[in-house]
């Protein structure tokens, strides 16, 4: 089974702090993604990466950055956390490739971040 | 870019009845449509998907239909059970592939009443 592990289930941080959310996948997937989930807004893509050291902006990248130094690990960074970044953050990965089956995304359990 | 609309946002059905969730998409080039189920405290998990060259796909109590002309697709759950209670998301992947992520609908909270 594909396993996507997010390092924390719950996190409480203060406004202005630098926050790191870590995600690790164990299936040698090429693509990794960070989403945030908010009530009534569904899942929104923040950043994604299709290779080591490669990153692309999603729909809502403002206030976030990412790092992918190793294939299995994709980190989301909040440089200076703000209260409007309080949310559920979901990491996902996919094998990558032209076939439909290679684009199935596997999600972690999520990190619920509260910024006070 | 792709835009996916999902309805209803909340759906309450009696146990044993059927549930239908509907989605529309905007990009006619989209050609793959997965459905995810998110249980409380967990990340979304793929439950069924359909490609644009297929009109219907069934897996036990769940089925998905696709109307490419109208650009809409639906999830059907028959004989609903308590464990079907969850948030369901539809999604679309454009013809360029899934490397740049899925476009999700806003989700439907399905409640199964005993």
Image: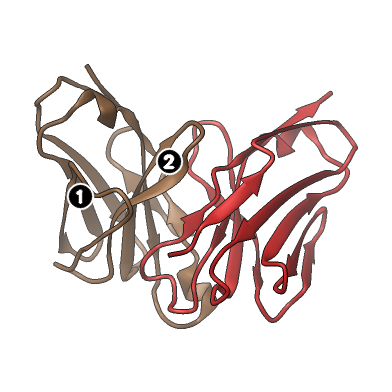
Chain colours: A brown, B red
x then y, percent, for residue A74: 23, 55
Mark 2 lies on a secondary structure that is: loop
Residue A82 vs A102, above or below: the answer is: above
Q: Nearer the viewer, residue A111 or B71?
A: B71
Mark 2, residue position: A109
Q: CA distance from mark 2 to mark 1?
A: 15 Å
| Quadrant of the rendering where the N terminus of chain B is positioned | bottom left
Q: Nearer the viewer, residue B71 or A39?
A: B71
Q: Is residue B63 visible to us here? A: yes
Residue that appears at 69% across and 39% down? B8
x then y, percent, for residue A57: 25, 59
| B98 sits left or right of A19 in the view | right
| A55 sits left or right of B8 in the view | left
Label 1 neighbourhood size at 10 Å, few (<14), some (14-19), many (20+)? Answer: many
Residue that appears at 59% across and 61% down? B25
Which numbered tag is attached to residue A75? Answer: 1
Residue B87 vs B23, above or below: the answer is: above
């Amino acid at each position: 089974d594909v396993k996507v592990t997010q390092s924390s289930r719950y996190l409480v941080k203060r406004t202005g702090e630098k926050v790191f959310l870590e995600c690790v996948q164990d299936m040698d997937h090429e693509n990794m993604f960070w989403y945030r989930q908010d009530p009534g807004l569904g899942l929104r893509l923040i950043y994604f990466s299709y290779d080591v050291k490669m990153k692309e902006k999603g729909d809502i990248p403002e206030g976030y950055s990412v790092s992918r130094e190793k294939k299995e690990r994709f980190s989301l960074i909040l440089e200076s956390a703000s209260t409007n970044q309080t949310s559920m953050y979901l990491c996902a990965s996919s094998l990558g490739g032209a076939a439909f089956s290679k684009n199935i995304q596997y999600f972690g359990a999520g990190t619920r971040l509260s910024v006070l | 870019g792709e835009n996916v609309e999902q309805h209803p946002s909340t759906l309450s059905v009696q146990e044993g009845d059927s549930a239908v969730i509907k989605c529309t998409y905007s990009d006619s080039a989209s050609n793959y449509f997965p459905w995810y189920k998110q249980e409380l405290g967990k990340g979304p998990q793929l439950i069924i998907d359909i490609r644009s060259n297929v009109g219907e796909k069934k897996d036990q109590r769940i089925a998905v239909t696709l109307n490419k002309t109208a650009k809409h697709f639906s999830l059907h759950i028959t004989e609903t059970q308590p464990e079907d209670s969850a948030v369901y998301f539809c999604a679309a992947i454009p013809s360029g592939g899934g490397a740049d992520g899925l476009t999700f609908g806003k989700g439907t909270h399905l409640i199964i009443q005993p």
